[in-house]
Amino acid sequence: MSKEWDRSERSVRRMGREEERVWAEFYRCAGDPAIAAELIAHMDQDEQARRQHAGLYLRCRQSLRREKERRQRAQAVGRVLRKLARGLFGMPLAALKRGGRFCVDAGAVLFARRDEPAAGQLRKLGKRSTRAMPAPEEAQARAGSDGR
């Protein structure tokens, strides 16, 4: 019986040492936000583990807080860079585009073919006179029917 007792005592000690190694590894990996989130979820469910490894729990919380702050800083820097790029490139390019459109429109107005007012009026009169004048055959038929 003493041999059985020694075996079970050894296995318990071995498991205890292995458990301590695993927790020590968790302490090393607590800086990783993904692992920290999993450890916090586990410790929130297991009160004894949280009491036993309070330092690890706090370190994981700190790791998540740092990650959140890092993301917020990165987003702020991204916003500033986007505004800066818009100011340096976007607005001048938009102004150039508007200026280009204005030049195209102004050129079209300046170089458009314009007739003299008299030429346009003559064309209008010419169109009216051809419509108002009867065809030559009709004119002869009318003249012949009058008996003249």
Image: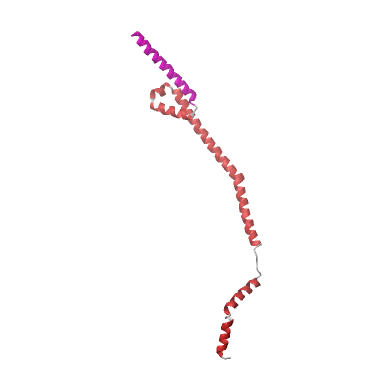
Q: Is residue 89 left or right of residue 68?
A: right
> What span is colored magenta in the figure?
1-30
Considering every residue shown, the one lying at the far top of the view is 2
Near-viewer residue (115 or 126): 126
**Number of numbered discs visible in the structure rendering:** 0
Q: Position of residue 27 (x, y in %)?
A: 47, 23
Near-viewer residue (53 or 144): 144
The residue positioned 47% from the left and 22% from the top of the image is 25
Screen quadrant of the C terminus: bottom right
Query: Is residue 122 depicted above or below 37 in this figure?
Result: below
Considering every residue shown, the one lying at the far bottom of the view is 147
Query: Is residue 5 depicted above or below 130 in this figure?
Result: above
Q: Position of residue 67 (x, y in %)?
A: 50, 31
Screen quadrant of the N terminus: top left
Q: Is residue 90 left or right of residue 10?
A: right
Does the magenta portion include 7? yes
Q: Position of residue 69 (x, y in %)?
A: 51, 33
The residue positioned 57% from the left and 88% from the top of the image is 144
Does the magenta portion include 28? yes
Which secondary structure dominates the residues rendered in magenta?
A: helix
Q: Position of residue 139 (x, y in %)?
A: 58, 84
Near-viewer residue (82 or 29): 29
The residue positioned 58% from the left and 80% from the top of the image is 135
The residue positioned 43% from the left and 16% from the top of the image is 17
Query: Is residue 50 depicted above or below 98 in this figure?
Result: above
Considering every residue shown, the one lying at the far left of the view is 1
- Quadrant hosting residue 57: top left
What colour scheme has been applied to the protein in the rendered image? secondary structure
